[in-house]
Image (cartoon, helix red, strand yellow):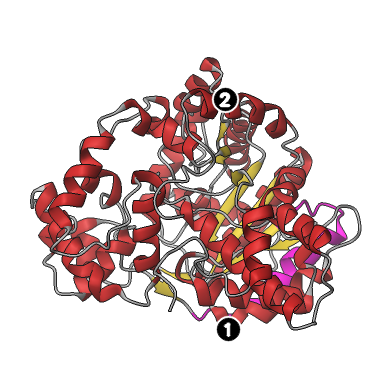
Amino acid sequence: MKNFLDEHFLLHSKTAQKLYHDYAKNMPIIDYHCHLPQQQIAENKQFENLTQIWLYGDHYKWRAMRTNGADEKYCTGNASDYEKFEKWAETVPYTLRNPLYHWTHLELQRYFGIDKVLNPDTAREIYEECTAKLQTPDFGVRNLLRKMDVRLVCTTDDPVDNLEYHAQLQAERFEIPILPAWRPDAAMNVDHTANFNKYVARVEKAGNVSVGSYSDYLTALKKRHDFFAAHGCNVSDHGLEEIYAEDYTDSEINAIFDKIRSGKDLDLTERRKFKSAMLVVFAEWDWERGWVQQYHLGALRNNNSRMLSQLGPDTGWDSIGDFPQGRSLSKFLNRLDTDDKLTKTILYNLNPADNELMATMIGNYNDGSAAGKIQWGSGWWFLDQKDGMTKQINTLSNMGLLSRFVGMLTDSRSFLSYPRHEYFRRILCNLFGEEIENGELPNDIPWVGKVIQDICFHNAKNYFNWQYVEKQSIITEKNILKSGKSHHGNSGSL
């Protein structure tokens, strides 16, 4: 019987172990999509205790705690930090076979060197040990990034954000580039008239443009797009239920904009036409700049209206949606491709029923202009677990080129989430190792190892054209060596 979470965790053959330990383990991390708060990086925040860094804002854990019977006061309410941690420690033993069980203990090992299993009996000891370490300089958020050998981070930013913390980090020449990503969801969301008009006012202020027409609105947003580019942005991201690809005319969109600006509600057809037009505009701007555009598709958000009214969005009340994706996605990509304005694109699906759809859709628009120009992104949100990752890797292998895949991202608000990259890498190496040992792949370890390293790091570096990541890595390695830390901490039993 193997020990829980030992050095060969998830690696079920000697070949898988060799591939991981010799090729994947020490590859750096490029986190090209996450929700880390840039202010905390700029301020090099020190968290007061384990609850604050681990449970604040983590709706994955909140959902599990609620399911286990914990009152809301222990999730988002006014219970003390230690009381909240106690409830999490009570919940963890019941998360067996949920990825939270693996993530929890990987994070305890990698960041804090703790091998113990978290449960009510170990809660106080683990809480106090971790909290004490969090008070030391090694556990400021910048050193947490260094500890995981993170080479670049893309945050997620609204077009009206002033990017002051990105500017601060760039002025300081922080050796890990923290770049903004353009996330214009609010700029095209005309489902609620009052909310949209409030947002237009914010765009007016940020762009310093008086918005009296749709043309003015685009002018103001384009100024923000240029502003993001001036701060190093070369990535956009859209969180949508589905791609909108309705037919429309310019006169229709002008009239729709005037209607909503007059305070009138739009009907469903008008809303879909406006969103379709905005998606095309944003995609063309990204193409002009040579940016990479990302589309996260399929989340059914804010299902519990009672809790939404109490807590707001992003508090754990979302699920997988069953929206139709194929026809509109094809129509949208085809329009851009026909006009020769289709930039590099990454598609993510939340419904696993769309796996084969996504894996085959990307092949329709890979035109040879760049390796893996159109990508199907890694398992996202409810799918970034062992089964979801395995299915994504296998489907992409069957219907595309896994070797050109840009790999894992974190998609997290937590500075302790980087072991998810390790989780992905172990699963990847295990799949290759198993097929080599079964004679389904040649026993060419150097070549397979290179492909794995490409998926872990090099493909993303080249795809996003972040060539300076290699240069920055020299500085990062010096910092790690100076502080006595090896890659990924190498603490605990691994």
Q: Can residue 281 be seen in this view?
A: no
In this figure, which residue is indicated by the disc labeled 2?
Answer: 175
Q: Residue at x 60, y 29 (%)?
A: 477
Residue 305 x/y as whole percent: 25, 69
Question: Dot 2, crowdedness within 10 Å: few (<14), some or many (≥20)?
Answer: many
Marks counted in the figure total 2
Q: What stretch is highlighted in magenta?
A: 322-345
Q: How far is mark 2 from mark 1, CA to CA?
A: 41 Å
Amino acid carrying mark 1 in the image: Ala
Q: Is residue 327 above or below residue 166?
A: below
- Could you tell me the amino acid type at mark 2? Glu
Instruction: Please state if 55 lies on the left or on the right of 5 as rendered.
Output: left
**Residue 350: horizontal and vertical position, in percent?**
52, 71
The correct choice, above or below, for 328 with respect to 128 in the image is below
Report whether 415 appears left or right of 222: left
* Residue indicated by mark 1: 353
Residue 36 lies in the magenta-colored region: no
Asked if residue 344 lies in the magenta stretch, the reply is: yes
The tag earlier along the polypeptide, 2 or 1, is 2
Question: In the drawing, does residue 81 fall left or right of residue 18?
Answer: left
